[in-house]
Amino acid sequence: QVQLVESGGGLVQPGGSLRLSCAASGFSLDDYAIGWFRQAPGKEREGVSCISSSDGSTYYASTYYADSVKGRFTISRDNAKNTVYLQMNSLKPEDTGVYYCALIIGTLYGSSCLDPDYEPDGWGKGTLVTVSS
């Protein structure tokens, strides 16, 4: 069964850190681009960060970030663990929301995955991040 499962969410104080994980089962993640998206209560879904599929010979992957998280969030992938991570530092209350990882089949065209109307090809069920004192 093909699945994406997010974990690592929770309650954190402003300025704190969390690391989200997106684990794949039923397929190999390194062949695909992966995106992280979030949805805050009462707001539209937004793209947070994306990582391209890795080059099998040199392990190079392009990464893209929304302006609101640049310098604070880092996306990475561990192909041996079939997992993509989102390290989130200096968290702010406005980072609160449900975070979803998503599968992107085919070519990732630059930061197009961050466009408001971008539709990935598959979704995890999400993990809740709450930033509050």
Image: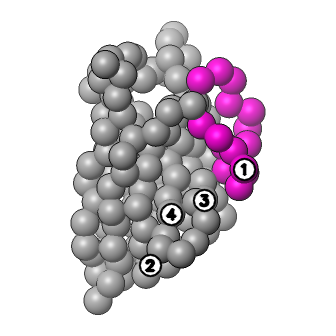
Crowd class of label 3 (few under 14; some 14 to 19; many from 20; radius 10 Å) = some
Give the residue pinned by disc 1.
Answer: 117
Crowd class of label 2 (few under 14; some 14 to 19; many from 20; radius 10 Å) = some
Q: CA distance from mark 1 to mark 4?
A: 14 Å
Give the residue pinned by disc 2.
Answer: 92
> Which region shows up in magenta?
105-120
The residue type indicated by label 4 comes to: Gln
The answer to whether the residue labelled 3 contacts the one labelled 4, judged by CB atoms less than 8 Å apart, is yes
- The coloring applied to the image is one colour
Dominant SS of magenta comes to loop
Work out whether mark 1 precedes mark 2 in sequence or the reverse, and give the earlier one: 2
Q: Determine if residue 71 is in view.
A: no
x then y, percent, for residue 100: 44, 50
The residue type indicated by label 2 comes to: Lys
Work out whether mark 3 precedes mark 4 in sequence or the reverse, and give the earlier one: 4
Q: Where 113 sits versus 99, above or below? A: above
